[in-house]
Amino acid sequence: MSPFRHRVGRAALLVLGIVMAAGAAAQSSQAAKPAKTAPAAKAAAPFKPILEPRAIELLKTMSERLAAARGLAFTALVTYEHPSRLGPALAFTTLSEVLMQRPDKLRVVTPGDGPASEFTYDGKTMTAYAPAENMLALADAPATIDEALKEAFSRAAIYFPFADVLLADPYKNIADGLISAFYIGQSKVVSGIRTEMVAFANNEVFVQVWIGVDDKLPRRLRAVYRRDPLRLRHQLDMTQWQIDPVIPAGAFTAASPAGALAIPFDHPVKPAAGLQPPPAGKSR
């Protein structure tokens, strides 16, 4: 999320209608047959939250794999939905290149869609840069990635959907308020590798995650938030994983372009009239 401005994307939705009609003879033949009484539907059994050991073990193994890495690099493709005027949700995407070194270095470069941005954290300073506008915001930073992510969100509304992957203890965040976790099965198509599918939920969000069978890394996450009345879906695909990559010198040195306009490291400025997003719950 860029700290500089919010832009409302536009998308077109093509609706295809298919009309199916039966022949007149078939209709009259069906009409001559006596109607059958549908069997009474059985009431669905109430859902009982369960914490399946297999699901918990997979989530812990994934988290331990991430936490043990001294450094991580991956590409994050985020797809999120927004209601359209026609009803069905529109999908918007962002792409980010992520590089992290524990305990205090992070770089996230987001070339698109939407406003391009670069976020850099070196253990002392957080820098947010908008290359198209050539605007730069700097702020003193706390000592760890966990704390820097919280600070960036609280001060400037900078949020990364893959933030949980970067935490020092990813499972702690999953386990907080966990009310259900269950194993779904295997997939052979996500990221072109075999994955184990697990679903888990707390009082805020329902998540399905695809975890690599061999490397134990998260490959896809789909989330629906409980307090969202529209049940819009958010999807995160993570590819091109590198564990403990060789990190070149200066990788976490923030951009300092000539002539960049220095702005406060603060919440985004409210958009000008005509560019404001619709009120919550309204469609585009």
Image (tube, rainbow, N blue to C red):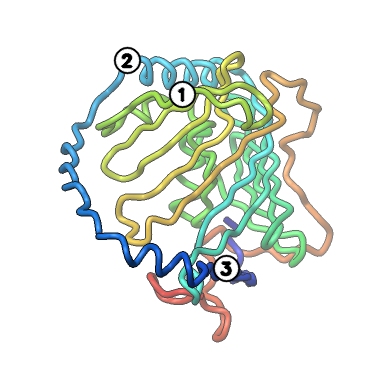
Residue 89 place in picture, x, y as percent? 50, 63
Secondary structure state at the residue bearing disc 1:
strand
The answer to whether mark 3 and mark 1 are in CB contact below 8 A is no
Residue located at (49% from left, 72% from top): 24
Q: From mark 3 to mark 1, how far is it between C-alphas?
A: 34 Å
Q: Nearer the viewer, mark 1 or mark 2?
A: 1
Eyeballing the image, is 270 above or below 207? below
Residue type marked 3: Ile
* Residue pointed to by mark 3: 18
* Residue 144 visible in the shown view: no
Chain-order first, disc 3 or disc 2: 3
* 92 is higher (above) or lower (below) than 48: below
Mark 1 belongs to which amino acid?
Gly
- Closer mark to the observer between disc 3 and disc 1: 3
Q: Check disc 2: other Cα within 10 Å, few if <14, some if 14-19, many if 20+.
A: few
In this view of the protein, can residue 57 be seen by the observer? yes
Look at mark 2 in the image and give the residue it sits on: 53
**Circle 1 residue:** 185
**Residue drawn at point x = 52 percent, y = 31 percent:** 165
